[in-house]
Structure formats: C-alpha cells, structure tokens
Image: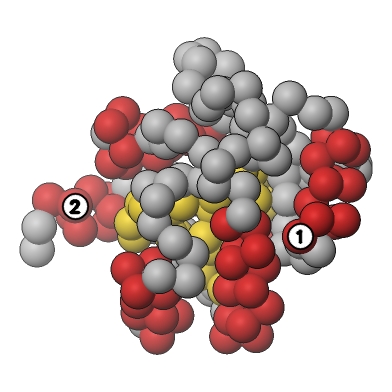
Amino acid sequence: MNASTLRRQTAMTTAHDFSFSKLASEGDIRLGDYAGKVILVVNVASACGFTSQYRDLEQLYEAKEKKGLVVLGVPCNDFGAQETGEEQDIRAFCDKTYHVSFPMTGKVEIVAEPRRHPFFEWIAQEAGETALPRWNFHKYLIGKDGALIDGFGSKAAPLGPEVLGAIDKALAA
C-alpha cells in the first residue's frame, strides 16, 4: 500500500463533504448527493482558449451520465480574468453556445487564501498546493467513494485517452 492510498483511507474528509452554490439559481450542489458516482470537477471560464472544451465535456456527460459520471463545471475568474461575467451571463453563455446540461456551480475563487473555496483547499491538502489549477479547465476525477483519484491539466482533452481511460476505470471500480 502506498502513502497516497493510506492517506485516502485515513482521511476524515472526502469530496462528498463539500457543496457549492448553484449557478445563477438558489440552492446548493452537494457532492455527497453524488456518492456512488464518479465526478469530474472542472474549473471553467467563458473567454479562455480552452473554452471549446465545454463541447467535449457536454459530449462526455451525455455519453457517460447513465453509467454513473457527473461532470461539474465550476466557473472561476482567477486565471487571466477570463470569467468576468455575472452568473446569469455565464449560464446564458453555456446554454446558448454549448447547450450545457451538466451541473454548474456559482463562481468560486481558487487561488486566493483565505477566500479559496473549501473544495480546492481540500485538493491542496490531499495532493499538495502544486495540484491546484494553474489555468482554466483543470480537471479533477473523484471516485465513487469521494476520494481524489487524479487531476488533469488544462491541455488534457476531456475525450482524450488519458481522461477517458481514468474515467472508465473509475466507473468500473
């Protein structure tokens, strides 16, 4: 058993302990509601060179939702100020441009402590500060048990073999 596995087994906190506000609406998205499913958490932005990944994320969600995958878009303006819009503008952009049907959270901060969203603080504790996003469209794969499985940089295509392989393996577990 490696140190990472041991840390996961002894951790008192999992991704299922966190929630986000919903994008441009009332209520919360509780990750615990997705227990037993695989979650791909992606920090997103509307005016980024990687914004077209929304298309692949939606395709991925449509293809694997019934198999137990949840894609969760998390808007953030921390990287290049590429998500400056109000939440209703982000929702309208996602609906009109990419027909996004996967859950979207309210805007969060990732970089700045102490305003960093608790989920991303957990990521830093689980995998180290270097595991935090360096840019938009960073992806985190969360297992059915709420454990952090892996992270993928912005350049990792949602439908590429690295991400798809990890998702398929997590869904089969």
Residue positioned 52% across, 60% down in the render: 40
Q: Is residue 131 visible?
A: yes
Residue 98 circle label: 1
How much space separates mark 1 and mark 2, taking CA atoms? Answer: 37 Å
The foreground one among 53 and 11 is 53
**Amino acid type, callout 2:** Ser
The foreground one among 168 and 120 is 168
Q: Position of residue 116 (x, y in %)?
A: 54, 23
Whether tag 1 and tag 2 are in contact, CB under 8 A, the answer is no
Residue positioned 73% across, 50% down in the render: 104
Q: Position of residue 108 (x, y in %)?
A: 65, 30
Crowd band around label 2 with a 10 angstrom C-alpha radius: few (<14), some (14–19), many (20+): few
Q: Identify residue for label 2.
A: 4
Q: Position of residue 54 (x, y in %)?
A: 64, 57
Q: Earlier in the sequence, mark 1 or mark 2?
A: 2
Residue positioned 32% across, 38% down in the render: 131
Q: Is residue 14 visible?
A: no
**Amino acid type, callout 1:** Tyr
Crowd band around label 1 with a 10 angstrom C-alpha radius: few (<14), some (14–19), many (20+): some
Q: Position of residue 31 (x, y in %)?
A: 61, 54
Circle 2 — which element?
A: helix
Residue 79 against residue 165 in the figure, above or below: above
- Total number of numbered labels? 2
Quarter holding residue 143: bottom left
| In this rendering, position of residue 127 left or right of residue 119 | left
